[in-house]
Amino acid sequence: MATELNGVDNNDLKLIATLQARVKELEAENAKLLSLLADCHSHEMEKKSHSPGEKGMKSKKANKKSEKKIEKMPGYCTKFMSHHSKRYVALKVMYFGKRFYGFASEAQMEPTIESEIFKALEKTRLLVGDRKQSQYSRCGRTDKGVSSVGQVIALFLRSNLKISGANSGSSGQIILDEQHEGEIDYVRVLNQVLPNDIRILGWCPVPVDFHARFSCLSREYKYFFWKENLNILAMESAGKKLLGEHDFRNLCKMDAANVHNYRRRITSFEISPTDVRYDGNQLCVIKIRGSAFLWHQVRCMVAVLFMVGKDLESPSVIDMLLDTEKIPRKPQFIMASEVPLVLQSCEFEDIKFMCSSDAGQALRLHLANECQAYQLQAAIFDEALLNCVPLSDDQSSLPIRETKKKASHVPLMSRSTEPSYEERRAKFNSNT
């Protein structure tokens, strides 16, 4: 009898062990599928936005290189880190772009803002797995020299939170709720290791199907400039013509290999003075908001607005450039400088960035110190200006800003043109 009972007990124990093992397998599979679901969403959206051209192939190669760098980093074991709890997080980023070769690391030039951020993520051990596994996305891909106070990125980061509201599995626990008590202070930790010209302004937990680019509702850019003798009223009149949905192929740098739809919507345009003045000159700012922007679109629009402000072009030139049936080829002109351009903000639904009191105080102190440092540099240049060798009597009678030699202006509609979209596509197809 005792032998039979022992046999029954052993069978029960085996059954329990089998069921427990199966439960763990299902939990692991569930976590894996959850991550894949968000991955698929991102890939589907990217396929709809553009087809993979030559630039896309280069981007993939660059991503693989960056992943290898992370894996080879001494003392950084991505397999070990992948078993930590993780949560999908959006980060709000500011950077002073002057010394960087753009935001994206695919630029093949160093340094980039993105590469510096990933170095900080590696150094602080916040990155879970490699870049691909982190489900990384960015809102804007600003160019060389462009700054931002509102860039947004999203990715999986290591979390201090456990089990509650999480799916556990072989790839670690995925925190799904919005709890932040006891969480890693992402802003403080990252800002301690980032270079002085990059800072995290805030963080927010986001759903796993969130995408920093495709979930964005609108973006706002600011472009700073000195008023000098510009006709602001004419610039405002021309700028208002940009409002609404238009085909902006004549006001951007065309990427015919990857972009096939050049219609974008501008929702607001404004020119206003700032509180900054120097030597009797007023610093002004152009604010432009839209759902999305094309490559170099803002700098091209501003370049034409400056021509209007100098009374070299009529505000009606905007109407002509937006009429792509009459003007299918973009007139050649130089874009406005990248240095005064700032990505001001990226708007999302139900995203509220947070920053701890300690991190916020440290951030404000750092930014105030940076402002003072740049003001000291300005003071030195101002002192040098005062100590220049005196000008001759003829030269001293001319205002400093009017001593530049004026180049003869060729009207935009009389200039040589770039190839049309159709011509670019035909050339691209013949080479593939």
Image (spheres, rainbow, N blue to C red):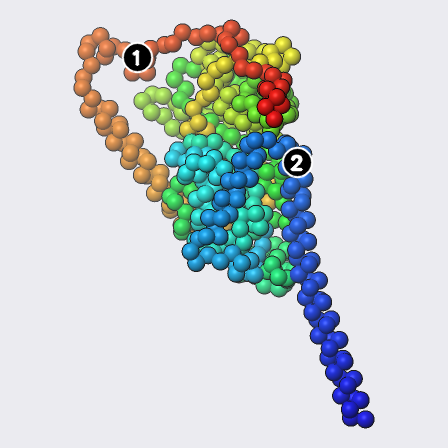
Residue 248 spot, x, y in % from top left:
59, 21
Q: Label 2 crowding class (10 Å Cα cut-off): few <14, some 14-19, many 20+?
A: few
Q: Nearer the viewer, residue 356 or 216?
A: 216
Looking at the image, residue 76 sits to the left or right of residue 216; the answer is left
Which of the two discs, 1 and 2, sits closer to the camera?
Answer: 2
Q: Amino acid at mark 1?
A: Thr
**Does residue 228 sit above or below 409 in this rendering?**
below
Residue 194 spot, x, y in % from top left:
41, 47
Query: Which residue lies at the image location 57% right of the left edge and 34% below the top edge?
Result: 56
Where residue 154 sits, quadrant-wise, is top right
Which residue is identified by label 1?
A: 403
Query: Which residue lies at the image location 64% right of the left edge and 46% below the top edge?
Result: 39
Where residue 346 sits, quadrant-wise, is top right
Quick one: quadrant of the N terminus?
Answer: bottom right
C-alpha distance separating marks 1 and 2: 52 Å
Q: Nearer the viewer, residue 53 or 24?
A: 53
Label 1's element? loop
Q: Earlier in the sequence, mark 1 or mark 2?
A: 2
Where residue 317 sits, quadrant-wise, is top right
Residue 195 spot, x, y in % from top left:
39, 45
Label 2's element? helix
**Does residue 258 sit above or below 420 in this rendering?**
below
Could one spot residue 352 in this view of the protein?
no
Looking at the image, residue 19 sits to the left or right of residue 345; the answer is right
Looking at the image, residue 148 sits to the left or right of residue 424; the answer is left
Which residue is identified by label 2?
A: 47
